[in-house]
Image (tube, rainbow, N blue to C red):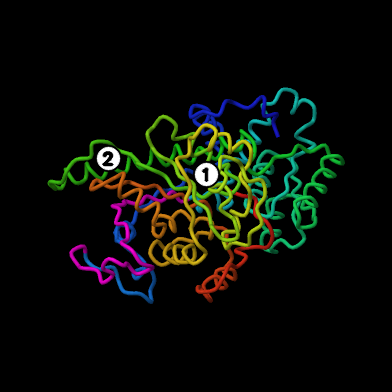
Amino acid sequence: MADPATSPPLTRASVAAARELIAPFVHRTPVITSSSLSALASLPSPFPYLSSSSPSLPPPSSSHPEGEGGWEGGGKKAKPKLRLWFKCENFQKVGAFKARGAFHAIERLKKEPGWLAGGGAERGVVTHSSGNHAQALSLAARTNGIPAYIVMPTISAPPKIAATKGYGAHVVFSGSTSVEREAVTAKVVEETGARLVPPYDHPDIVLGQGTLGLEFQEQVAAMMAEEEDAAAAAGETKPKRLTFGLDAILAPCGGGGMLSGVALSCEGTGIRVFGTEPSYQGADDAKRGYEAGARVEAVSSLTVADGLRTPLGRVPWGVIFERRLVAGFYSATEDQIRRALRLAYERLKLVVEPSSAVPLAVALYNEDFRAFVEREAGDRGWDLGIVFSGGNVSLEALGTLFADESGGAGNGDGVGVGDGE
C-alpha cells in the first residue's frame, strides 16, 4: 500500500480526485426508487406489510389497525415522512463497492515514487480477506498486470475461494483467527516483497470508497430535476422543490472505510450521514464507541450481516468521530435485517447481501431513528439515501436465512470474519 503520508488529504476534493482516477475501471452504479417502500417507511409501523405472507400496502387514505400501540411493542410509533433512494453497489464490479477502494489503492500505489521503477509491480500486492475485498483487489491487480496474493482462512466459503482464484489471485490459506491471518500475510510479504493493501484502514481506501457518495448525490439531484420537469410538461400542479438533493444517507458500517468515505463526500453539503450496524453479539461496536468517545478495537459476533463483523478502523474513526462527519449510529436486530432483506427481494427484485439490508432495516424499524426524522423533518419529510453495499450472497445462504426467520443469527454467506464495509 502507498505510504499513508503520501496520500491526499481526507477531503471532499480528494474524493472527487479519486473518482477521476478510478473512472475507467469501475461502474457508475444505478440509483433506484420505490414508491411502495417509501410509503411503507412512512407508516407508523411497517411490519404487517413487509412480505408476501402479510397484508398488502393499504391506500394512503386507509386507517391502520395498530392504533397507539403499533404492531410491535407498546407505545406510540413514530411516523416519519420518508422518500427512499437506493444506491445499488450490488451492480458494481465484483458485486460490491469494494472495487472502488481497491482500484484507487492500486492507482495510488502506481504513483508512489520509485514503486514501479523499483519492481513493485512485479512483486505484487497482498491482503488477508475472506470477503469482497479479496475479489476486488484480485480484479484491480489483474487489470494492471500485477500479481495478487490473498490470504484466506481454510474455512472460507468455497464459492468465495473459487471467485477469488477466478480473478487470477494466488490464494494462500491460513487459520481463522486474526493473529493467524496476519502471520501468514507477514510471511507472504517477507517471501515475495508484495505490498499490503488493507481492506479499509487506509486513506486511499477511504477516498476510493467515498466516490459512491459523490455519484449518489449527483444522481439523486438529477433525478429530482427530471421528475419536476416531467411533471411540469404534463401540466401537473404540485409544489416545487426548493432544492434538489438528499437530506441524509444511511450506510452500513463494519471497518468504516465506506462510511467514512461517504461522510467525506458529503462534507459541507448539509447532507447528514449516519452509520448502521447489527446489534447482535456486540456487532454495533462503532455505535458503542461513538457514544462512549473511545474506539472499540475488537468484535466477536456471528451476525447474519457477515460483512459487518469487523471493528472500526483507526483511519475511519478519525473521520467519523474525531471530525464528527458522521451524525450518529443506529442498529438493527437480526430479525429486522432478515425482514429488510426479504423486502429488497420481494419489492425491489434486487439481490443484496445481508450487510446491505442493515440501512433499510434501520429506516423501517429503528424507532430512535424514525422518531428523530419525524422531529427533524416534520411535514416536509426527508429524502433518505440508502446504500446497498453489495450483492455477493449464495442461493444456499439465502435459503438458510429465510428458512427460519424467527431463529437466531446465521453465518451469512461464508464462514469466519468478514473484511468490513
Q: Quadrant of the N terminus?
A: top right
The part of the image, by quadrant, that contains residue 131 is: bottom right
Q: Which residue is mark 1?
A: 291
Q: Secondary structure at mark 1?
A: helix
Q: Which mark is residue 225?
A: 2
Q: Secondary structure at mark 2?
A: helix
- Chief secondary structure of the magenta portion: loop
In the picture, measured across the screen, residue 61 lies left or right of residue 363, that is left
State the image coordinates of residue 233 (x, y, percent, origin top left): 16, 44
In the picture, measured across the screen, residue 12 lies left or right of residue 128, that is left
Q: Which mark is residue 309?
A: none
Kind of residue at disc 1: Glu
Is residue 342 or residue 312 the one in the foreground?
312
Query: Within 10 Å of the Cα at label 2, are there few (<14), some (14-19), or many (20+) other Cα atoms?
Result: some
State the image coordinates of residue 245 (x, y, percent, origin top left): 33, 39
Q: Is residue 112 inside the magenta stretch?
A: no
